[in-house]
Amino acid sequence: MARRPGAEEERPWGLAEHGRLGKRKVVGVVVLDGWGEAPPDPFNCIHVADTPTLDALKKGAPERWRLIKAHGTAVGLPTDDDMGNSEVGHNALGAGQIYAQGAKLVDLALDSGKIYEGEGFKYIQQSFDTGTLHLIGLLSDGGVHSRIDQLQLLLKGASEHGAKRIRVHILTDGRDVLDGSSVTFVETLENDLAKLQEKGVDARIASGGGRMYVTMDRYENDWQVVKRGWDAQVLGEAPHKFPSALEAVKKLRDDDPKANDQYLPPFVVVDESGKPVGPIVDGDAVVTFNFRADRMVMLAKALEYEDLDKFDRVRFPRIRYAGMLQYDGELKLPSHYLVAPPEIERTSGEYLAHNGVRTYACSETVKFGHVTFFWNGNRSGYFNPNLERYEEIPSDTGIPFNVQPRMKAVEVAEKARDAILSGKFDQVRVNIPNADMVGHTGDLEATIAGCKAADEAVKIILDAIEQVGGIFVVTADHGNAEDMVKRDKSGKPIRDKDGNVQPLTSHTLNPVPIAIGGPGLAPGATFREDLPDAGLANVAATLINLHGFEAPRHYEPTLIQVSPVPF
Ligand SMILES: O=C(O)[C@H](O)COP(=O)(O)O
Ligand SMILES: [Mn+2]
Ligand SMILES: [Mn+2]
């Protein structure tokens, strides 16, 4: 939804009191990451898992449980074929409005050619005569962090606008797309680069690695991940050297079953004499072509900040660097970017802070920014430090999440419980990551264990809400664990000749549940029935109501109605 420029400033921040819902009830908000709704089936890990708390919410009060949309245009993505993800999901949950998201904004800028007229492109273009253009990012059509078709257009456009020497540093996916698909994406990219070479552009893939092991860490969980990428991309150093990326991806996958697309070790492409074909050196231009912020911020810092003590960069090249988007509006990082990010304004967090509502938010590292930074419209920090407290529980590092599928769910829930019981907060908000993080590993058994742990965490929070006479809202940001297998068009799992299925590691297009309740909820409060197409963006107005206020008029409508209860 486009904003009228200038209109924001005129609007007052004060919210009217809700006629029927009181203030100062503690509202516990649980976002179950990657928890969608799908028919029962052996590959629906949420269904298979023992989840008595969530089951009771669904069965216990049908007028206080419903499904909402969490994918596609309902969350500002280009089409309804786009699965949901944490960024757009938490943006919508927190902002109460639907904004055209990064994926869509980049599409528009590429289609119109405006991307080449912007400040960011003009800036990097200054390096094209004498330097190399490096493009670093996730190579897939997942549409969560990046899209290969956007990379293809950018390659073509950059070469038409003067880039003579181009090096692509790829990160293989297998998380937002099927494992093993990296081979096809590399083939596609190599074909494109060969076509550019025919036109006289010196264009090659220079390095690569799996996204979870190389470069794409987030929220400063493990800087070693970024270092591995830096060594390959900037220094041209990696444990594995290959004459081409295609060989690299095929061989590394064949040699070690643990080297799947997500965890492929870093490699560099070398010439006949064994020299890396594309280290990043002084005078070069660099673009990180992911549009999504969380997993690019750390690399952006390494490329842009003169001082950085997180790892030894060995060499800090003098480059012109632009992000596909600006990844952090507060930090202004990076300072140059090709496409302006969505301006997500007047989020529920900011409104509530202006209206004296005290908020506590918590998750473990891997999802901490989801329930703070994304929730607040991609802003780091507090709106009002006197009213807000955000707490992060350190995530496990160095292991895939199927090894410890319970993650820190209970620890996060216990922090929330303490915050609820403390009497110091009006909203206590958490993200419970298991269904998503373990779901992404494709390990069914572990995902089932993760869903069980998530359910236990919800129980801890609901018990605390019960104790203080509060209200709860339990929902999710998108699907994942409820469908863990690749299916044919009719929905049947696809089996190979040996009867094996391929695990689905990605998110889904499924709706997510939302449940409200608790002793503090007005007896007449139920879900409205006139919003069958409601989505995540309708949650913010609902929450504002539950805090005792009318929602701003420009928000997507509230999900609840409050009928007077007869004596
Ligand atoms: O970054 C990731 O882990 C996946 O690409 C998307 O997962 P998320 O949107 O749940 O973070
Ligand atoms: Mn998520
Ligand atoms: Mn996910």
Image: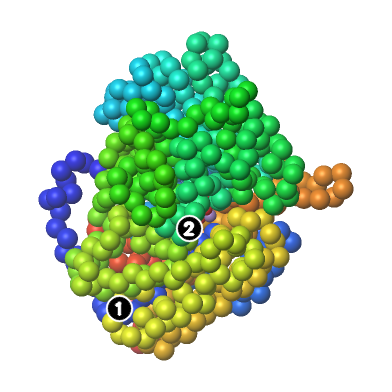
Residue drawn 26% across the image and 51% down it = 330
Disc 2 residue: CB within 8 Å of ligand 1: no
Identify the element where label 1 is drawn.
loop
Residue drawn 61% across the image and 24% down it = 273
Q: Relative to residue 451, is residue 144 drawn left or right? A: left
Q: Which residue is mark 1?
A: 425
- Which of the two discs, 2 and 1, labels the residue nearer the N terminus? 2
Give the image quarter of residue 26: bottom left
User: The disc labelled 1 sits on which kind of residue?
Assistant: Phe
Return the residue nearer the eye: 434 or 172.
Answer: 172
How far apart are labels 2 and 1 at the CA level? Answer: 31 Å
Quadrant housing the N terminus: top left
- What is the number of callouts on the image? 2
Q: Relative to residue 263, is residue 116 drawn left or right? A: left
User: The disc labelled 2 sits on which kind of residue?
Assistant: Asp
Furthest residue to the left?
10
Vertical comparison of 39 with 549: above or below: above
Identify the element where label 2 is drawn.
loop
Circle 2 crowding by C-alpha within 10 Å: few under 14, some 14–19, many from 20: some
Vertical comparison of 276 with 210: above or below: above
Q: Relative to residue 185, is residue 69 drawn left or right? A: left
Where is residue 536 drawn, in percent x and y?
Answer: 43, 56
Q: Inspect this view and state whether residue 539 appears.
A: no
Where is residue 174 drawn, in percent x and y?
Answer: 62, 45
**Callouts 2 and 1 close, C-beta under 8 Å:** no
Query: What's the image's color scheme?
Result: rainbow
Q: Residue 222, labelled with which disc?
A: 2
Return the residue nearer the eye: 521 or 201.
Answer: 201
